[in-house]
Amino acid sequence: MRAEDQWESDRLDVDTYLERLGITGPLDPTPGTLRLLHRAHVTTIPFENLDVVLGRGVDLDLGAMQAKLLESRRGGYCYEHNLLFAALLERLGYRVTRLHARPDLQYPKPLPRTHMALRVELEDGTAYLADVGFGDSGPLDPVPFADGEVSEQAGWTYRLTEEPDRAQPWCLHLRRGDEWFPVYRFTLEAHHRIDAVVANHFISTHQRSPFVGRVFLERIAEQWRLNLNNRTLTLRHADGGREESSVDDDRFGDVLADRFGIVLNDSELKSVLAVLPD
């Protein structure tokens, strides 16, 4: 098997994907097309872990991911988002390297290297970091793959930096006020599908995973970022404003539907509510 065949990008239903994003062709593999697709994906498909909460696990088979995120109009987490997006980009003629990253987030101890991001290269050799699966700290648009180059994105500002002496020399930063907040660190090593399967098993089943035992959803728009962490709903604006509220049982299903576009049946909603703290 050729290395690129392991991802089975040829199985992707491109038309269904583009319909989900509300995009029509032609879509030549240019920087403008990459930006269009990236922004459409992150503002359309939410980040969510509800299948973990419901005990279903997360299936990284391409057919299962597109059935869930595209046909059933659900969301997912980084592997689902970025594996689907990588398949779309490859079908459109981009060269894609799937990378594994270690979230930083100024956490006091090393976090596991369980995030997936993408290096996307154009025919002229220009490259971008694409990441449609990091939720409310992730970029709205692709970030130029160049040390220190700043990317302004509708009031949100990102940059990549390279520190060759570090084990993970590349770092994605988000500017918060006057400071650069480290989002995650990574190397340029290409990974295989089995690497994603192993990391996905940890993140969807291990008791120390941030997505096991709690409800977690995020939604990105151009001017705001929405986060639901169990019952706490937080809205952050590009200008630094912040609003926070608590969601009770009676409103929970409506918040999922109205704010995140996810509709659960009565049985699913009951199971999700059972996980929430009082």
Image (cartoon, helix red, strand yellow):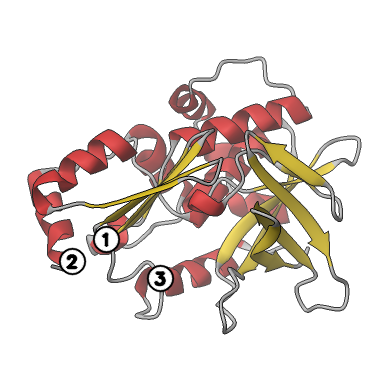
Camera sees residue 34: yes
Which of 159 and 274 lies nearest the eye of the viewer?
Answer: 159
Q: Secondary structure at mark 3?
A: loop
Judging by the rendered image, the residue that carries numbered circle 2 is 275
Q: Is residue 207 left or right of residue 11?
A: left
Judging by the rendered image, the residue that carries numbered circle 3 is 210
Q: Residues within 10 Å of mark 1 (few under 14, many from 20)?
A: some
Residue 154 spot, x, y in % from top left: 63, 33
Q: Residues within 10 Å of mark 2 (few under 14, many from 20)?
A: some
Q: CA distance from mark 2 to mark 1?
A: 8 Å
Which of 120 and 216 lies nearest the eye of the viewer?
Answer: 216
Q: Residue furthest right?
A: 124
The residue that appears at 26% across and 62% down in the rendered structure is 53
Residue 129 spot, x, y in % from top left: 72, 49
Label located before the other in sequence (3 or 1): 3
Q: Amino acid at mark 3?
A: Pro
Q: Amino acid at mark 2?
A: Val
Judging by the rendered image, the residue that carries numbered circle 1 is 230
Camera sees residue 261: no
Which of 263 and 83 lies nearest the eye of the viewer?
Answer: 263
Q: CA distance from mark 3 to mark 1?
A: 12 Å
Q: Is residue 159 left or right of residue 255?
A: right
Disc 2 + disc 1, Cβ < 8 Å: yes
Residue 40 spot, x, y in % from top left: 54, 30
Residue 136 spot, x, y in % from top left: 49, 50
